Image: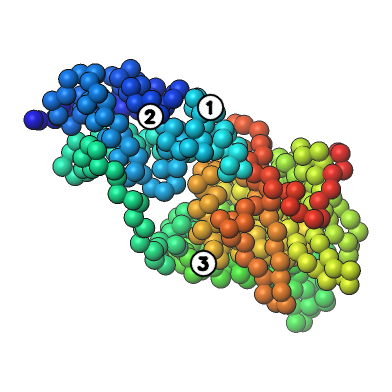
Amino acid sequence: MVLSSPPSIDQVKECLIKLRQGPALARPTTLLTALDTPVRDYLSHGRPHIPGSAEQVAQLDATIRSAIGLLSDTERQFAEVDFNLVNDHRFPTLTERQESLASHQKCAAKTVRRHAARALDTLAYLLIASGTTETKLPPAGQEPAESRPEPAAGPENLADTLRAFWRLSPNAKVDIVCSEIPADERPDYASPADRNYLRYAKFADLDTLIYIRTRLAQLAPTVVVRDFAPSEHYDTHADVLVVIGGPPWNAKFREFLPQLPFHFEPHPLGEDDPLVVPALDGLSLAPRWTSRGELIEDLTVLTRLTVQGTTVFLLGGCLTLGVLGAARCLMDADRGPVNAAYLTDRLGDDDFVLVTEVRRVGGITDVADLTMIEPLLVIARSAGEGWGVVTDNTKRFAGRQHTGS
């Protein structure tokens, strides 16, 4: 029998939205009321079922479950929860199921809703494609094949992930503004008047500057990269602005502080400047030290903002280790793509602040793996909205206190 004409994606999406309300596929007969007749007919794959019969319900149920099984691992988990197919999140309403998943993933419910909406879009496409010769779902009664492991991502695919995250389009203009040592702390040869003048002698966070410049050259050799001290940078026309080093020694970072949900509490030179988050009862996080004055761990504070078409990355930390940790977290050849995908999957294009620990053993700097150990804190905002906490694992951090401010 010839299949009926395919409905539009919008028609299928509207039906799926109705279907995932209430008990969803935990009560298969809901299919008869949630799916419009044209959609039911199309998803029956031309089989001559009596409308409303148990056979038709079984066919529709198998078709939708099979399509869910074809989603990527990430999207499938949201679809399975939405359509009430996961015992751990089995509740009578969609809201309860999504909030349960959000609690399990330690993220905001709106984050789950955003990913669920994307999964629903993909599912609608797969259901329409199920009637074409290009995409065939398993026949009714046959469970979808177990998700097959995807081929390991090659080096170029990993590089693409990083290029996309850092907005490194071909011929993009990238400005780096690196922190600078206070004038009274610089060596003589940091002055242009010195016979052995070295321009970079006034730059602080040099490890991070060199690391970022090297990785940009490897990832995107056609990108135009310029570096500046804060006192040198006045151009606002870059596609990407990377600000290295926190506000004490980087005036460019200080320009963004009024719109950020955190600040660093200023202390005299030689003392730590703790990270303070006013919205969390004045939460204060500071580096941890041994009794002998050896650094145990610093804090990485990575911020992404979009300002009038320029993507701004603020790489901060309480100490230089935290700044380098921010760069390595999302530029490292191995873990960088994993961490970038983790953030993109949960936050999309939203502005965000990521806070996590970073450690060093000798000269080796630890590189965070956000899929293994979740961030200490993620705060995000969508366009036109205020900042909201997405992930809060700060209770695990020993150097934590509340100032009540």
Q: CA distance from mark 1 to mark 3?
A: 37 Å
SS class, disc 2? helix
Q: Residues within 10 Å of mark 1 (few under 14, many from 20)?
A: some
Residue 278 lies, with reference to residue 251, above or below; the image says: above
Q: Position of residue 282 (x, y in %)?
A: 82, 41
Between 350 and 34, the one lying in front of the other is 34
113 relative to 37, above or below: below
Describe residue 116's horizontal placement relative to residue 32 as left or right.
Answer: right
Q: Secondary structure at mark 3?
A: loop
First reached walking from the N terminus: tag 2 or tag 3:
2
Q: Position of residue 163 (x, y in %)?
A: 47, 58
- Which quarter shows the N terminus? top left
The amino acid type found where label 1 is placed reads Thr
Q: How is the image coloured?
A: rainbow
Q: 9 or 196, which is in the foreground?
A: 9
Q: Position of residue 265 (x, y in %)?
A: 84, 50
Residue contact at pointers 1 and 3, CB within 8 angstroms: no
| Residue 87 or residue 149, whichever sits in front | 87
Residue 351 visible:
no
Relative to 283, 38 lies left or right: left
**Looking at the picture, does residue 11 appear above or below residue 337?**
above
Question: Can you tell which of label 1 and label 3 is closer to the viewer?
Answer: 1
Write down the residue under mark 3.
334
Q: Residue at x 29, y 43 (%)?
A: 143
Which image quadrant for residue 347?
top right
Report the residue that reaches farthest toward the bottom. Answer: 196
Quadrant containing the C terminus is top right
Residue 25 circle label? 2
Residue hosting label 1 = 95
Query: Which residue sits at x=79%, y=78%?
Result: 189
